[in-house]
Image (tube, grey):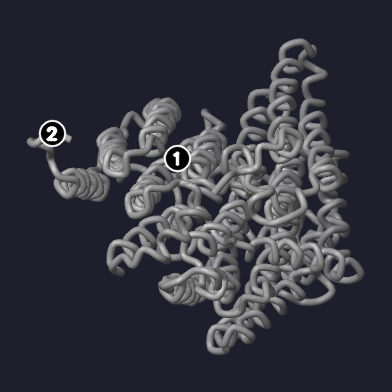
Amino acid sequence: MNFSTDTQASVIAILPEILMTILAVAVLVYDVIWPEERRVQLGYLAGFGLMSIAGVVWLIGVPPAGGLQEQLLLGGMVRHDDMAQIFRVMVILAGALSCLLAMGVLKLRARGDFYAVLIVAVIGASLMSAAADLIMIFLALETTSITLYLLAGYLRDDDRSTEAGLKYFLFGAFTSAFTLYGLSLVYGLTGQTNIYELGKTLATNGLPDPPVVIALGLVAVGFGFKISAVPFHFWTPDVYEGAPTPITALLSSASKAAAVGLLLRFLLAVFPPPELLGALEGVKDYSAFWVQLAAVLSVVSMSLGNVLALVQSNIKRLLAYSTIAHAGYILIGVAAISTDCSGDGAAAVAFYMFMYVLTNILAFGVVILFANATGSEQISDLAGLSRRNPWLALAMTIALLSLAGIPPAAGFIGKFLLFRAAVNANLVWLALVGIVNVIIGLYYYLVVVKVMYMERSEDEDKPIPVGTPYSWALGISVAGVLLFGTILVTPLLDWATDAAHALYVLL
Amino acid sequence: MEASEVSIELYVLLSAILFIMGTMGVLLRRNAILIFMSVELMLNAANLALAAFARQWGNGDGHVMVFFVMTVAAAEVAVGLALIVAIFRTKKSIDIDDLHLFRG
């Protein structure tokens, strides 16, 4: 295949990464030239810088018209399509809001190096959304991972942070070695590194099943780690609890969203369902393997995540197990993308991730404020929050309702779309397991709401102040969660559907 | 092609053996540095496979990937050792069984 060499299109395809690199350098420069007391503003520079880059992606980064050939740019390294765009906006927004959240953490807020590393993590996540070549996939995955190891262990004097960093690092390096070995087998089976080309070769050259399935399984380990699906979830609660909370927010949103975007693209391109390769002869179908794998991982992730969340007393750990359960819901959508090639499944996953990113940032933002004011992350200490700061309690309630899937929060529509996609793909049983899990999940989310509103505490007369950066971060996420759950459903869903259609163009 | 050429199967077999050795090392060792060395062994097993496949297919893509993997591994070493040092400062131990601040 000849890749497009259009210079302008190539630059636009990686414009967000170029701008973010400039922003990271700018943050470092201002870290040096600004006086100590002004460095607190670095978070605004990084946060609003990233937000404008998200706007640039949305407005200027229109993918080239035409088919696969026009969209595969830079020697086939990236595919600039709507799917890449929607996930990029998501991860960059998550990075921006995390920067604003970091401004509330005393040891982090005046450190330019911290924001610079955070921006590099977002660059990796953004590249993951667009990567279309084995080399780029590996590099983007590692760019995100290595920076996040650093960020998780950033508070060097804090035992819990360094321990979280080391655990995350050891698990991450171990699983990424599996992914790399899987990618090397995929290359060995086809002799190509562009995922769209090698997908066609893999489907038509009549290989025996075992090596292909082994390669798929090895690659799945790395993805399972990134989205914290059971049984690759062991790191999640410890790292979420120990890492600085803005980084926990980033881990649960940007890193996960980018991995989901890459997973959709990788599975559909490398192991495509045969109807997408209609014009080719002698196509072999490997998609059944990953549909089964995703369905099984989905069931165990949802069930284990929800059941273990029931017994947590620390709010960050509770949200960590809820993240594992949500990885299960997302995998329902992943299992549904192959049977039903209309694109509804992929659109549902993209929509769900968008709302999930905003919701998680919101929840962790409230946790930071609360932990700063009280020094505690225990759920029982949330008692009386509605009297100490009613707005904060309301924001947390909206986040929890969205995670639980109750209207008008966006989580309801997201879950509805996922389950509908599963039903359309003849996976009714999977949708039913999902619904049972949503009901289990309701319990522990509502317990937190009950503690905030019904229980009294001795500290009720001590209000919790909300600083300016937090007003921005929480305001934007609340607005997003509510608007995308009500009046803005249609525009976002239309965008996600366009994106999903692009994903199914493999020829 | 020379007559005494080693076949691709042997290279892949060797890389699989190295990969499994690395995996066992990660699972059985308790010292963070040794675990980390085992991870490096796994990465190098993948490198060997990539180089062998690149020769088999007669294109350079595999070699390019090997170079990137080596770069990434170096970056990973820098971050990993820094984290291990940070842990050692507070705990005076790098045994992963001593990492137990979190429960539940």
Cα–Cα span, label 1 and label 2: 52 Å
- Which residue is at a point 50% across and 48% down the rendered structure image? A194
Q: Name above or below for residue A157 compared with residue B49.
A: above
Q: Which of A37/A293 is in front?
A: A293
- The tag on residue B2 is 2
State whether discs 1 and 2 lie on one chain: no
Label 2 marks a residue whose chain is B
- The image position of residue A289, as x and y in percent, is 41, 73
Q: Name above or below for residue A479 compared with residue A45.
A: below
- Which residue is at a point 48% across and 71% down the rendered structure image? A294
Q: In terms of secondary structure, where does tag 1 sit? A: helix
The residue wearing badge 1 is: A163
- Which residue is at a point 44% across and 56% down the rendered structure image? B103
Amino acid residing under circle 2: Glu
Q: Which of B80/A40 is in front?
A: B80
Label 1 marks a residue whose chain is A
* Image quadrant where one finds the C terminus of chain B: bottom left
B21 horizontally vs A294: left or right: left
A88 horizontally vs A314: left or right: right
Instruction: Indicate the quadrant where residue B22 lies.
Output: top left
* Image quadrant where one finds the N terminus of chain B: top left
